């Protein structure tokens, strides 16, 4: 099999053809003019570098940063809302494919048939005993005067929750704060009965799928979730978009209520042509689905509901921002009449791939990924990342014309249907799991690349050093006197480098299912941004508030691309496992605190971590010695010693996985990093141990605590396996 054949086998499209909609004249013009502008820009860049001596490709890559290119692509990608499975999103797939092809980077589309969900009918009204009139909510997000996207707003899907159960409920409302387990437990302790009621909760601590799941478990018949001005509206009296970055009062955060990953009709396996499937009815009847009707609503609509609620005043930390009316617990006297009808249907999604084949090691893959589908216009989420990825690719195309070719293969991925449940990336990883397990060097994810000025990196620990070294090379987009590294150190974010345990983006299948070293990053303000998943996530918001001048987009592409270049080009992979045992010791101390006063022992973890530290020290020394031999020409670049070392560095992360998966979350195989069972968007360390401890606290039986010890031993065995892989010798 030739080098090209090996790559083609991995990336060949499925036999199912993508749908081929007729492209509207307006989008044809946009694509044509965008690609023409790219050609002119590319020619200019080539003129600049044509007469240069043999280039340092990293320095050349950094010098080619283009704010204008990122802005050009973002504007084109966000002209229309583009929800997964729709004609509009198919057009964005074609746009991304054509953008790569115009740069002479071979690109293609791979489709999948998956279960998606769309709204058919929804209504919500408020009745109060003794009032003559009923308030019917419009459930719409208002445009503003001179909104350039006002006409395209008609194409935005009505506000809804994907996979919400169809049905009608008329019941008293109960206020449930952030909808966490502890919030419903508090209501029960106060004698507030949630059973058969409509739970009213706000965003701010956990995501919508977990809020609605907790409401159902507590016995609620339906749920309403809103964006409270405390988190999304700024200070009292402060303006909102378009006059500031804050969410307008009619803004609504939509989302998916599916708590699983991938296509619901193919749990644990890929949605390939002709594959086994469960029926739509079976898929919708699992515990991963919400099981009750639910709607997202605006702060304005929620304020009317709050005003009609009676009962005791909610605690201080359940209240709204200063100046808000007192929030009460209920139940009633407010009665909510909620109706939702959804269309849960099989639809075609389209992943886009572009490949720069490696010269020396084409069977080793450095993978860059970003999702493309959006609930509305998607200027921040996700197409700030899409624009950065294409801008990065344009720079690499210039390097190619200057003679560069990567040592290892670089694969660009534009995922579809991430918003529904990481669907596009999950199906592809499941379909190619064994190939990726043996050949993937690293996965570099960017979801939202820019919403603010503060850099937020996340990684599996062996990539910490690479991340920091790369940040030192890139100028701070908001302060030319310092690097991104300088501003990052001063930012006081904690932790400085996050981990990839949560289930909120496309790295999940790579890290948590296969065990591939990975990174993710963004420029932002904090844990979120106010216009998230709303009508107002458009080019205007980005241009005015997210990234005026688009220098942050270019900086994100610089960091992303430089990490890819080093991983693809350096003879010895730039992995350093020394920080891993330090992290694991910190996680173990947390577990020891949680099991204090029980017979549970963490000695197996401590022993395994000591062995990992020894192995990491050994392999780090080996890496430095081989690098010295390379530098002094004592070792050939194609030496099997290098290949063997790289394989160990690459494969050690796989050893942290277990084929049985996590306790209660079997799809997730990584025993160190995975999502919390209670909050899919919260990163858990030793998630199986954490789940077992939570169960033991509830059941408080000998067997349940014995199971905690079993989970500790499972993690210890995985850490020991990682040590053996790094050491590179059989026991």
Image (cartoon, rainbow, N blue to C red):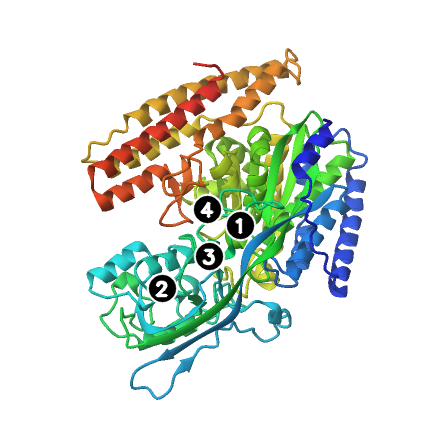
Give above or below for 206 relative to 438: below
- Residue placed furthest toward the top: 634
Dot 3: what SS?
Answer: helix
**In front of the other: 505 or 263:** 263
**In front of the other: 435 or 472:** 435
Q: Which mark is residue 503?
A: 4
**In front of the other: 553 or 315:** 315
- Residue 434 as seen in the image, left or right of residue 75: left
Question: Is residue 179 something one can see in this rendering?
Answer: no
Q: Residues within 10 Å of mark 2 (few under 14, many from 20)?
A: many
Residue at 43%, 23% in the rendered image: 721
**Pointer 4 or 3: first along the chain:** 3
**Pointer 4 or 2: first along the chain:** 2
Question: Pointer 3: what residue?
Answer: 284
Label 4 to label 3, Cα distance in Å? 20 Å
Question: Pointer 2: what residue?
Answer: 201
């Amino acid at each position: 099999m030739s080098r090209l054949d090996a790559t083609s086998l991995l990336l060949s499209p499925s036999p199912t053809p993508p749908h081929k909609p007729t492209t509207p004249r307006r989008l044809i013009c946009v694509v044509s003019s965008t690609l023409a502008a790219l050609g002119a820009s590319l020619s200019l860049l080539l003129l600049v570098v044509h007469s240069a001596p043999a280039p340092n490709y990293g320095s050349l890559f950094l010098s080619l940063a283009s704010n204008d290119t990122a802005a050009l692509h973002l504007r084109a990608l966000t002209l229309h809302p583009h929800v997964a499975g729709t004609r509009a999103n198919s057009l964005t797939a074609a746009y991304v494919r054509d953008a790569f092809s115009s740069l002479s980077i071979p690109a293609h589309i791979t489709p999948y048939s998956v279960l998606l969900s769309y709204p058919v009918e929804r209504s919500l009204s408020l009745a109060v005993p003794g009032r003559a009139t009923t308030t019917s909510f419009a459930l719409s997000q208002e445009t503003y005067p001179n909104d350039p996207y006002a006409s395209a707003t008609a194409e935005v899907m009505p506000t809804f929750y994907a996979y919400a159960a169809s049905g009608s409920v008329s019941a008293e409302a109960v206020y449930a704060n952030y909808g966490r387990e502890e919030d419903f437990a508090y209501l029960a302790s106060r004698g507030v009965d949630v059973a058969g009621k409509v739970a009213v909760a706000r965003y701010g601590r956990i995501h919508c799928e977990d809020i609605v799941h907790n409401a159902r478990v507590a016995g609620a018949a339906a749920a309403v979730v809103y964006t409270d001005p405390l988190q999304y509206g700024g200070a009292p009296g402060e303006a909102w978009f378009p006059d500031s970055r804050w969410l307008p009062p009619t803004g609504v955060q939509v989302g998916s209520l599916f708590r699983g990953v991938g296509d619901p009709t193919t749990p644990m396996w890929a949605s390939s042509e002709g594959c086994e499937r469960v029926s739509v009815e079976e898929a919708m009847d699992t515990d991963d689905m919400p099981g009750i009707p639910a709607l997202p609503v605006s702060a304005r609509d929620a304020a009317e509901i709050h005003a009609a609620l009676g009962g005791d005043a909610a605690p201080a930390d359940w209240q709204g921002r200063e100046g808000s009316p007192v929030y009460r617990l209920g139940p009633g006297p407010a009665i909510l009449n909620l109706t939702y009808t959804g269309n849960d249907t099989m639809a075609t999604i389209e992943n886009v791939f572009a490949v720069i084949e490696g010269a020396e090691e084409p069977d080793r893959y450095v993978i860059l990924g970003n999702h493309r589908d959006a609930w509305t216009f998607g200027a921040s989420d996700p197409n700030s990342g899409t624009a950065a990825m294409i801008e990065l690719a344009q720079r690499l195309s210039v390097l190619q014309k200057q003679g560069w070719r990567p040592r290892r293969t670089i694969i660009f991925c534009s995922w579809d249907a991430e918003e529904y449940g990481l669907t596009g990336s999950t199906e592809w990883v499941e379909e190619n799991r064994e190939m990726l397990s043996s050949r993937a060097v690293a996965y570099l994810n960017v979801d939202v690349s820019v919403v603010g000025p503060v850099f937020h990196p996340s990684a599996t620990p062996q990539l910490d050093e690479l991340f920091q070294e790369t940040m030192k090379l890139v100028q701070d987009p908001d302060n030319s006197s310092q690097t991104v590294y300088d501003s990052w150190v001063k930012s006081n974010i904690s932790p400085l480098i996050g981990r990839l345990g949560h289930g909120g983006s496309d790295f999940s299948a790579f890290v948590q299912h296969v065990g591939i070293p990975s990174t993710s990053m963004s420029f932002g303000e904090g844990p979120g941004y106010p216009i998230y998943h709303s009508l107002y996530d458009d080019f205007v918001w980005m241009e005015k508030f997210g990234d005026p001048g688009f220098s942050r987009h270019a900086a994100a592409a610089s960091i992303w691309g430089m990490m890819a270049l080093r991983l693809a080009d350096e003879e010895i992979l730039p992995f350093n496992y020394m920080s891993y045992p330090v992290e694991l010791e910190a996680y173990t101390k947390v577990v020891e605190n949680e099991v204090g006063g029980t017979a549970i022992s963490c000695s197996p973890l401590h022993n395994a971590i000591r062995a990992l530290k020894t192995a990491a020290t050994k392999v780090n020394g080996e890496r430095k010695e081989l690098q010295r031999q390379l530098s002094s020409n004592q070792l050939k670049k194609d030496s099997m010693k290098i290949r063997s070392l790289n394989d160990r560095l690459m494969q050690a992360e796989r050893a942290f996985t277990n084929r049985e998966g996590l306790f209660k979350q079997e799809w997730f195989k990584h025993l160190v990093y995975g999502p919390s069972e209670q909050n899919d968007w919260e990163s858990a360390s030793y998630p199986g141990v954490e789940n077992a401890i939570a169960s033991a606290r509830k059941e408080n039986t000998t067997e349940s605590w014995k199971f905690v010890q079993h989970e500790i031993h499972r993690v210890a065995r995985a850490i020991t396996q990682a040590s053996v892989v790094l050491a590179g010798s059989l026991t």
